[in-house]
Image (cartoon, rainbow, N blue to C red):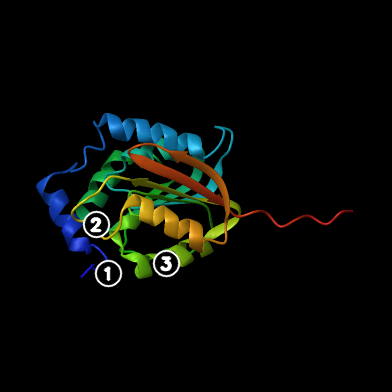
Amino acid sequence: MTPARIEPGWFEELYKTDPDPWRFETSPYEQAKYAQTLAALGPDSRRFHRALEAGCSIGVFTELLAPRCDELLAVDASPTAVAHARHRLAGFDRVQVDHRVLPEDLPDGPFDLVVCSEILYYWSADPLRELLARLEALVSPGGSLLAVHWRPQTKTYPLLGDDVHRILSAETHLVHGYQLVDDLYLIDRYDRPRAPTRPG
């Protein structure tokens, strides 16, 4: 039977054993993916007033994203990972790193950027649909929801990256704005249009 989600304790045990279990700091895969993830946000001139990064881990991508955000809230389910991320990001005044378990501790919106990188396949399909609806509701007009996921088979996660992105495409009420299909990962950005302005 597929579990409803990977429980937070699983991640905490990983980080207690290895402070960088997925080699976020050193993996060429991660570095290439981070560059493409930033590119998916649009031109460097596009800034985000308030952003949320769900599943920030030890804050490697958070550090790259922070210069484009006036405020950035990064969250993770592992207290050990959060401690590492806080240390890494100590010099960024406008970055807050919180220990939060999703969806129970989902922060209040709105956000004009919600980043879900390598996290949404930790839920099975029905709980994921519920989480996606709540994440989407956080996106402000003119804002974006960005999803990035590993594609190959795993033995642990309830869903594959392709499954996550198919569900997102089928369920979202946002407008698809960008896609990158790599052999190893998918990137999709969905945007909430701004309300039209009245003439005069």
Mark 2 neighbour density, 10 Å: few (under 14) some (14–19) many (20 or more):
some
Count the labels in the image. Answer: 3
- What residue is drawn where x is 13% and y is 44%? 18
Q: Quadrant of residue 198?
A: bottom right
- What residue is drawn where x is 39% and y is 36%? 182
Mark yes or no: residue 47 visible. yes
Mark yes or no: residue 91 visible. no
Secondary structure found at label 2 = loop
Q: Which residue is mark 1?
A: 4
Measured in 3D between alpha carbons, the distance from the residue under mark 1 to the one under mark 2, in whole angstroms, is 10 Å
* Residue type pointed to by label 1: Ala
Rendered location of residue 17, percent (x, y): 10, 48
- What residue is drawn where x is 34% and y is 50%? 161
- What residue is drawn where x is 75% and y is 55%? 196
**Residue 85 horizontal side relative to residue 46, left or right:** left
Q: Which residue is mark 2?
A: 157
* Residue type pointed to by label 3: Arg
Q: Which residue is mark 3?
A: 129
Rendered location of residue 44, percent (x, y): 54, 32
Label 3 vs 1, first from the N-terminus: 1
**Residue 96 horizontal side relative to residue 77, left or right:** right
Label 3 vs 2, first from the N-terminus: 3
